[in-house]
Image (spheres, rainbow, N blue to C red):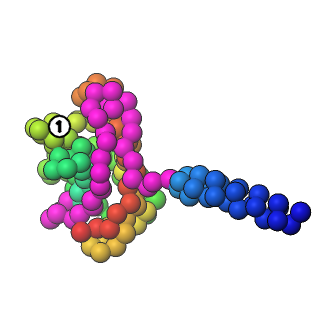
C-alpha cells in the first residue's frame, strides 16, 4: 500500500510541478487592441535614464516594438501614483510613445498614465505599468507592464 501511494505521489509530482512552475506570470507584457494593427511580440525590456528622460523599450532584434519616453521635467515620482503622460512640459507632453521597427511611427495618445513602484535610479530594479488610449491608430489601446534594472 505504501509503495502504491509513494508511486502515485511521484507521478503526481512529475506532472503537477511543471504545470505549477509554468504558471508564474511574466512581469513584462504588451497588450491592447493596437495588436490588431501592429504585432506586439518582443524579446526584452530595457529601462534607462537618458538625460532628463526615463526610457522604457520593448525590443525584438534591433527593433523597438514600443518605446515610451517620460520627461522628468518638474516631476517628483511618488511610488504607486499615476503620472499623466499628457501633462504639458517644455518639450511637448510628459510622455511619448513610438514604434521603431523599419521606420519610426509616432503613437500619439488621447489618454495615458504611467505608474512606477519606485523612484528610478541607475542600478535599481524598477517595476511599473502604463495604460494608454491612442489617437493613431484611432481609439486603440496600448498597455504595458515591465520590470527591469535601470541603466
User: Is 106 displayed left or right of 15 in the figure?
Assistant: left
- Horizontal and vertical percent for residue 40? 31, 39
Q: Hey, which residue is sitting farthest top in the picture?
A: 138
Occupied quadrant, residue 65: top left
The residue at the point 36 percent across, 44 percent down is 30
Occupied quadrant, residue 2: bottom right
- Count of numbered badges drawn on the protein: 1
- Horizontal and vertical percent for residue 20? 60, 55
- Please name the residue that numbered disc 1 is placed on: 106
The residue at the point 20 percent across, 41 percent down is 99
- Horizontal and vertical percent for residue 72? 24, 60
Residue 96 appears anywhere in the view: no
Occupied quadrant, residue 103: top left
The residue at the point 32 percent across, 68 percent down is 149
User: Is 16 displayed left or right of 96 in the figure?
Assistant: right
Q: Residue 14: within the magenta?
A: no
Which region shows up in magenta? Answer: 25-53
The residue at the point 11 percent across, 38 percent down is 102
Q: Residues within 10 Å of mark 1 (few under 14, many from 20)?
A: some
Depth check, front residue: 6 or 150: 6
In the figure, 123 relative to 43: above or below?
A: below
Report helix, strand or loop for mark 1. strand
Amino acid at each position: 500500500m505504501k509503495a502504491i501511494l509513494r508511486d502515485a505521489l511521484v507521478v503526481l509530482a512529475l506532472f503537477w510541478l511543471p504545470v505549477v512552475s509554468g504558471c508564474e506570470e511574466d512581469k513584462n507584457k504588451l497588450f491592447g487592441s493596437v495588436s490588431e494593427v501592429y504585432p506586439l511580440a518582443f524579446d526584452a525590456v530595457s529601462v534607462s535614464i537618458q538625460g532628463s528622460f526615463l526610457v522604457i523599450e520593448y525590443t525584438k532584434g534591433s527593433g523597438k516594438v514600443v518605446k515610451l519616453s517620460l520627461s522628468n521635467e518638474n516631476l517628483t515620482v511618488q511610488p504607486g501614483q499615476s503620472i499623466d503622460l499628457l501633462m504639458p512640459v517644455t518639450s511637448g507632453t510628459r510622455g511619448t510613445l513610438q514604434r521603431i521597427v523599419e521606420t519610426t511611427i509616432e503613437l500619439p495618445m488621447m489618454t495615458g498614465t504611467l505608474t512606477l513602484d519606485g523612484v528610478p535610479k541607475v542600478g535599481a530594479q524598477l517595476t511599473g505599468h502604463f495604460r494608454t488610449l491612442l489617437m493613431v491608430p484611432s481609439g486603440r489601446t496600448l498597455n504595458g507592464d515591465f520590470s527591469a534594472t535601470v541603466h
